[in-house]
Image: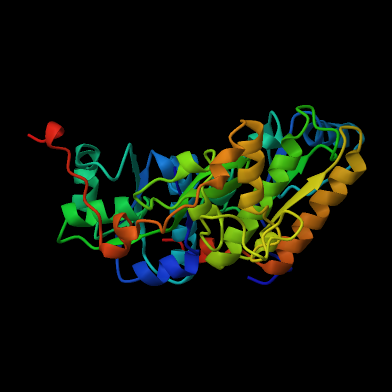
Amino acid sequence: MIVAERKSIPELVELLKDYRRILVLGCGTCVTVCLAGGEREVSIIASALRIAGKLRGLDFQIDELTIERQCDNIFIEQAAEAIAKSDAVLSLGCGAGVQAIAERYPDKPVYAGLNTKFLGILEERGVWAEKCTACGACVLNDYGGICPVTRCAKHALNGPCGGSREDHCEVRPDLPCVWQLIYQRLKSTGQLDRLRQIEPPKDWSQSASGGPRVLIREDHRI
Amino acid sequence: MNSDNFEPTIVAFCCHYCAYSAADLAGSMRLQYPPNIRIIRTPCTGRLEVELFLKAFEDGADGVIVAGCEEGSCHFKEGNLIAKRRVNATRELMNESGLEMERLRMVNMSAANAPLFKKAMDDMVATVRKLGPSRLKKVAP
């Protein structure tokens, strides 16, 4: 899922101080699961903004709405009425959601209430960890399903760097060296011979460095 | 309004299995606790959410106190520990929003500890009285 966390209330108040009627718009997908922008967080942030606004003498009129997915026009339509009534929209969607709303409503100021952090998973209650960089050319099959592109601080593709210390990363000593995890994984699945292959330089042309990517599926186009 | 004649409104979320019973016992023991307290019984403090605390302040509470079981004695094992984290998260939000975080606190007690219930409520009223009325009320339309 896409993992995000809320911006601070003073930052949001500063963004919204010139507006009166504000729609706090949540998203029912990734940011609901990572507890950053779902229905509950909409309620919490709306309350905090009302409180902060009153204390600063701002007359915020805040509406609350959560739609299933902000990155999908079919669901954005469900917010049309609420968006039309508002002077500005504070989107609690991920970066894609915010831009989808802004593109759909060119005349409406749309602000991001969250900082979108990474693609990750819930490791334990309250702990999310990055697992994927969306590099566009997945190498997971070569490394037992553990991604060195994302989880090695140096993106090393041919074994650990010289800084691996007691199975831990030298850049982030609190994290295990991903190459230790890859070795253990390939050993336990009887695939250690895979490590004998020399991985050629990665094809970064599929990543975002060439500008925003577009995926076209002719079989689904109308 | 000075702090001498200010009578704060304090919402007390009291767990059914401890603080609510302690409040009841305080009555039976003729222990007078401040009339500023508005008790809301909850099945467990773990039921309480951040938005409920914020709503209480939005609706005019000068202070909110959450009274749960002693740590390690929650009827539902860890509801009071969950509540503690939520109270702390709410205090952080209050701080960011400009509302004094001292207006929200959590206390722990057993059902048998009526004197502690009285003391906790006395302390809360004293703290909020010192802070003065919630500025949310003063500037509310």
B20 left or right, relative to A36: right
Q: Please name the residue shown 75% across and 57% down the image.
A: B125
Q: In the rendered view of the protein, which quadrant contains the N terminus of chain B?
A: bottom right
A185 left or right, relative to B73: left
A112 left or right, relative to A11: left
- Relative image position of residue A13 (x, y in whole percent): 42, 68
Viewer-proximal residue among A12 and A58: A12
Relative to B95, is A29 above or below? above
- Relative image position of residue A203 (x, y in whole percent): 35, 56
**Residue B13 shows in this picture:** yes
- Relative image position of residue B102 (x, y in whole percent): 70, 62
Q: In the rendered view of the protein, which quadrant contains the C terminus of chain B?
A: bottom left
Viewer-proximal residue among A78 and A51: A78
Viewer-proximal residue among B110 and B116: B110
- Relative image position of residue A175 (x, y in whole percent): 67, 55
Viewer-proximal residue among A91 and A119: A119
**Residue B62 shows in this picture:** no
Q: Please name the residue shown 60% across and 53% down the image.
A: B61
Q: Please name the residue shown 34% across and 43% down the image.
A: A65
A117 left or right, relative to B89: left
Q: Quadrant of residue A192?
A: top right
Q: Please name the residue shown 49% across and 60% down the image.
A: A51
Q: Quadrant of residue A217?
A: top left
